[in-house]
Image: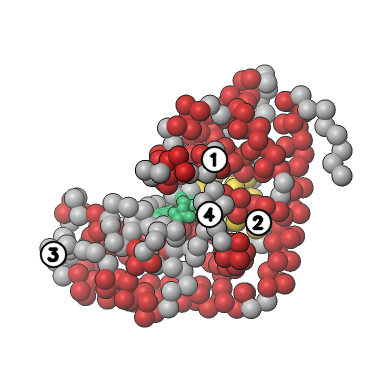
């Protein structure tokens, strides 16, 4: 069975983008893969996180993943900081990856913005840590939104260079798994920008814990254009906001843009937005209720994550120890 690894940052409340682009697909992959699901708190601190908020968000993220159907018994759910192998392998990869490769990463450019000099060094080497997350388990399949495709290519470049430099065939090639019609959900305020949990505007996204009134209000206020919905998919060209709302509807109903337009094309946005808001409430309310139930017993939640970290470390530690041996480290016993 192929091994899958994927991670999500506890940098805020998970959004509809995280759900449709990632989490929902994780649950499907559990049927026929061996899966490791990681709340990547080491990645989250590449941007400033208030310590109390980071702790709370890490537990909220874990609870949300469980509420969405992540299975911590037949698969593994854990916090990245609970398995030292990630940081150990990331250091080796910092010494394998080339500055020229990192300079091409568009996510760094987007996130650092104009104030590049003030970005953390961690944000710059973020892709090396992501490569370590995956290679520490010899995982070969990684479900991600298509915004992460470039980072996976870099993870493969790092593996190839490591294998070449040390004359081995140790780290396998990784294959991205990009599923579903809404592989990229866009901001409700700007259809050209990805929906993000750390966007300063809460109106730009649907949070998985938003209540019914908040969802309805955000969808009603979502940016659109004055034209009615087209009847054909071609009519969505150059209409990013309309395309985004139709894409969300299609993903939630497991159909495609064409079927949504067959049912709603020709309408103004008012009735379509009402239908979309109702659909979102119907899909998200059970997730939010189950998340709150799980958060009500913090000790039980932490016990699930503790057991997950121990099982993850049992896979990663021997792989990372072997990488260290290949590099030439003597390999003292760790106290
Ligand atoms: N808008 C999106 N559409 C589709 N997929 C998305 N993902 C994130 N946003 C969208 C996918 O969710 C997974 C986890 O992402 P992450 O939390 O590790 O980092 P991110 O991609 O940087 O997500 P955010 O929400 O934008 O977080 P912040 O604001 O903290 O940077 C990934 O598989 C990602 O593709």
Which tag is nearer the camera, tag 2 or tag 4?
Answer: 4
Secondary structure of the residue carrying tag 4 is loop
Separation (CA) of disc 4 from disc 1: 12 Å
Direction from residue 191 to residue 182 in the image, left or right? right
Mark 4, Cα crowd under 10 Å, few <14 / some 14-19 / many 20+, is few
Q: Secondary structure at mark 1?
A: helix
Disc number placed over residue 226 in the picture, else none:
3
Whether residue 21 is situated above or below residue 126 in the rendered picture: below
Q: Is mark 1 within 8 Å of ligand 1?
A: no
User: Label 3 neighbourhood size at 10 Å, few (<14), some (14-19), many (20+)?
Assistant: few
Q: Which residue is mark 2?
A: 79
Of tags 2 and 1, the one toward the viewer is 1
Residue labelled with disc 4: 48
Do callouts 3 and 1 mark residues in contact (Cβ within 8 Å)? no
How far is mark 3 from mark 1, CA to CA?
44 Å
Residue at the (48%, 29%) spot, across then down: 101
The label on residue 121 is 1
On the question of residue 58 being in view, the answer is no
- The one nearer the camera, 40 or 249, is 40
């Amino acid at each position: 069975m192929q091994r899958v690894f994927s991670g999500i940052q506890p940098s805020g409340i998970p959004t509809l983008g995280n759900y449709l682009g990632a989490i929902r697909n994780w649950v499907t992959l559990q049927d026929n893969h061996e899966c490791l699901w990681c709340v990547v708190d080491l990645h989250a601190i590449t941007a400033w996180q208030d310590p109390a908020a980071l702790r709370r968000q890490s537990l909220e993220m874990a609870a949300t993943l469980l509420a969405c159907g992540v299975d911590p018994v037949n698969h593994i759910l854990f916090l990245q900081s609970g398995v030292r192998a990630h940081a150990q392998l990331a250091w080796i990869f910092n010494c394998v990856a080339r500055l020229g490769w990192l300079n091409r990463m568009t996510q760094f450019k987007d996130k650092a913005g104009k104030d590049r000099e003030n970005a953390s060094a961690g944000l710059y080497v973020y892709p090396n840590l992501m490569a370590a997350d995956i290679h520490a388990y010899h995982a070969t399949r990684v479900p991600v939104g298509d915004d992460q495709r470039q980072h996976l290519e870099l993870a493969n470049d790092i593996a190839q260079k490591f294998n070449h430099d040390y004359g081995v065939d140790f780290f396998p090639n990784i294959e991205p798994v990009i599923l579903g019609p809404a592989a990229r959900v866009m901001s409700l305020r700007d259809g050209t920008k990805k929906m993000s949990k750390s966007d300063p505007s809460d109106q730009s996204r649907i949070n998985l814990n938003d209540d019914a009134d908040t969802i309805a209000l955000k969808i009603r206020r979502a940016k659109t254009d004055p034209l009615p919905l087209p009847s054909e998919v071609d009519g969505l060209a150059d209409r990013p906001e309309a395309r985004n709302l139709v894409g969300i509807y299609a993903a939630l109903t497991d159909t495609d843009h064409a079927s949504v337009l067959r049912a709603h094309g020709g309408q103004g946005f008012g009735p379509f937005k009402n239908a979309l808001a109702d659909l979102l409430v119907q899909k998200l309310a059970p997730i939010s209720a189950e998340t709150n139930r799980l958060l009500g017993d913090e000790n039980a939640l932490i016990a699930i994550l503790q057991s997950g970290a121990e099982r993850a470390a049992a896979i990663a530690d021997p792989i990372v120890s072997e990488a260290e041996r290949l590099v030439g480290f003597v390999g003292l016993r760790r106290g």
